[in-house]
């Protein structure tokens, strides 16, 4: 007869080992998953608003989440085992680059969906904020004089 308590203990031990191993990248994986979630939520809102329902595309969220997460995990393993955790003096640089790349892609997708909803491009909003900040700084400097 199979001892279930032994299997349960072994499974819990393996989960704890895996969690300890990936602890340094959990924040980066969480960032990517949050970006995917925001993009998906905005995409669903856009589909409902414009009445463009395509349920087959929603499955891509699962595939994308696993692909992005496992590519970050793979970059982490490569960084840890081949580069000994540092590349050009920066800890886990390859992991950070992969994470930044996936977040960039998701931000572009969020921006495109936002534009479909009638909003301005994100870069234009940032430029306007920077212009306003410069004007406010100039006004403050004039007030100081």
Image (spheres, rainbow, N blue to C red):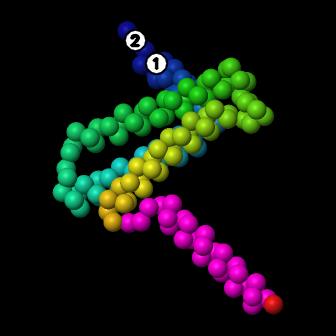
Quarter holding residue 128? bottom right
Q: Which residues lie in the magenta part?
A: 119-144
Residue drawn at (60%, 76%), measured in percent from left and top? 132
- Tell whether label 1 touches label 2 (CB within 8 Å): yes
Residue drawn at (63%, 75%), measured in percent from left and top? 133
Q: Is residue 25 above or below residue 9?
A: below
The C terminus: image quadrant? bottom right
Dominant secondary-structure state across the stretch colored magenta: helix
Q: In this view, does 13 lie above or below 43?
A: above
Quarter holding residue 129? bottom right
Q: Can residue 25 be seen in this view?
A: no
- Give me the disc on residue 2: 2
**Residue 26 x %, y %:** 57, 39
Q: Is residue 132 left or right of residue 88?
A: left
- Give me the disc on residue 7: 1
| Pointer 2 or 1: first along the chain | 2
The N terminus: image quadrant? top left
């Amino acid at each position: 007869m199979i001892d279930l308590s032994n299997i349960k203990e072994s499974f819990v031990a393996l989960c704890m080992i895996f969690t300890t191993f990936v602890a340094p990248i959990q924040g980066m994986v969480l960032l990517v998953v949050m970006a995917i979630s925001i993009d998906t939520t905005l995409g669903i809102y856009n589909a409902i608003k414009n009445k463009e329902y395509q349920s087959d595309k929603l499955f891509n969220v699962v595939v994308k989440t696993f692909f992005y997460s496992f590519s970050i995990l793979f970059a982490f393993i490569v960084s840890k085992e081949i580069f000994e955790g540092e590349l050009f003096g920066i800890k886990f640089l390859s992991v950070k680059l992969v994470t930044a790349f996936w977040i960039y892609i998701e931000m572009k997708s969020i921006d495109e969906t936002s534009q479909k909803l009638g909003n301005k491009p994100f870069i234009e909003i940032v430029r306007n904020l920077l212009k306003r900040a410069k004007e406010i700084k100039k006004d403050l400097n004039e007030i100081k004089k």
